[in-house]
Amino acid sequence: MPEGHTIHRAARDHRKLFVGFNVAVSSPQGRFNIGAKSINKQQCVAVEAFGKHLLYDFTNNQSLHIHLGLFGRIKQRKLPVEEAKGEVRVRLVGKTHFIDISGPTICEILNEQAKSKLIGRIGPDLLRKDADPIKFFERVSRSRAKIGTLLMDQSVIAGIGNIYRTEVLWRQCVHPNKRGQELDRSQLENLWNDAQALLEVGVKHNKIITNFKKVGSVNTSSLNIYKKKKCPRCQGVISKIDISGRSAYFCDFCQPNS
DNA sequence: TTGATTGTTACCGG
DNA sequence: TCCGGTAACAATCA
């Protein structure tokens, strides 16, 4: 479910729900018995997203660290609390709402040192004001790896997932198999700027939207080529390839690799 | 029941 | 050291 926009949207929403309040934190038994006692009913002082990682900071300098992975979800509901549905691993209860987090791949409590280490290994985050695009430009420019791989590497650029990868490369007419070092500075700037703009739209609408064209007043589709057969620009056939286990789509004509 | 899926990490070989 | 490939793990739905 989540690319960067989902996590930053959650951080924005949860800031209003939890910061400044004593938050009840509970977790069930099993793999994700995180020992929530140490943060339970502590005051939440911040909620922040770093790439696809979500951190809830508490007064005792500990943080709840969540990564939703491929299947994780966050459900937000109004109080009173209801019985959890599905594989809920953590529940946070605030003054007016509660959230259930199901299926995360990471769900743990970090101290300050571990938190710094985590933040340190995440690349520039398209949705953060403190992001430094120069780091992205330099890293890609000296890499032999495919741009399709690099865009999904969260230590190179944080926030892009499989759908934005396909859509941004198509919008900028770059073949996913181009090597990082084959791209010039203006292409990299365009990729950065476009991805950033699209992710911001994603946060605003809580949805991935990369196609803004309307026929009459109706949006034909919010995506251009992801899982599609035909290129909306040239009407050509969309190809599908596997890049490190994930499906990437591209238009042979609009995104030449030569 | 099977396959697919908006993700990440560890490990190995080249 | 970099890069590609593979496996493991997560939960849900068609």
Image (tube, coloured by chain):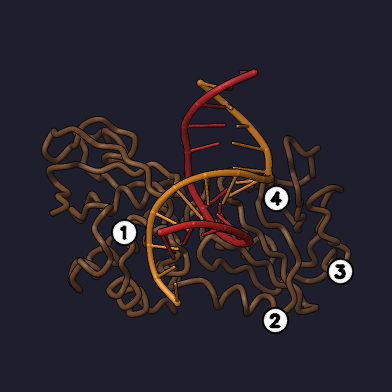
Chain colours: A brown, B red, C orange
- Distance, label 3 to label 4, CA atoms, is 19 Å
Looking at the rendered structure, which numbered label has been put on residue A113? 2
Subunit of label 4? A
Of label 2 and label 3, which has the lower sequence position?
3
On the question of residue A126 being in view, the answer is yes
Residue A15 placement (x, y as % from top left): 62, 65
Residues tagged by mark 3 and mark 1 found on one chain of the structure: yes
- Distance, label 2 to label 3, CA atoms, is 17 Å
Q: Nearer the viewer, mark 3 or mark 4?
A: 3
- Distance, label 2 to label 1, CA atoms, is 33 Å
Compared across the picture, whether A233 is left or right of A30 comes to left
Residues tagged by mark 3 and mark 4 found on one chain of the structure: yes
Subunit of label 1? A
Vertically, is A39 above or below A243?
A: below
- Distance, label 3 to label 1, CA atoms, is 44 Å
Vertically, is A122 above or below A73?
A: below
Looking at the rendered structure, which numbered label has been put on residue A96? none
Q: Nearer the viewer, mark 3 or mark 1?
A: 1
Residue A75 placement (x, y as % from top left): 65, 45
- In the rendered image, which residue does mark 3 sit on? A38
**How many numbered discs, if any?**
4
- In the rendered image, which residue does mark 4 sit on? A99
Amino acid type, label 1: Lys
Of label 2 and label 1, which has the lower sequence position?
2
On the question of residue A216 being in view, the answer is no
Amino acid type, label 3: Ser
At 21% from the left and 32% from the top, the residue drawn is: A230
Q: Nearer the viewer, mark 2 or mark 1?
A: 1
Looking at the rendered structure, which numbered label has been put on residue A146? 1
Of label 4 and label 2, which has the lower sequence position?
4
**Residue A228, quarter of the rendered image:** top left
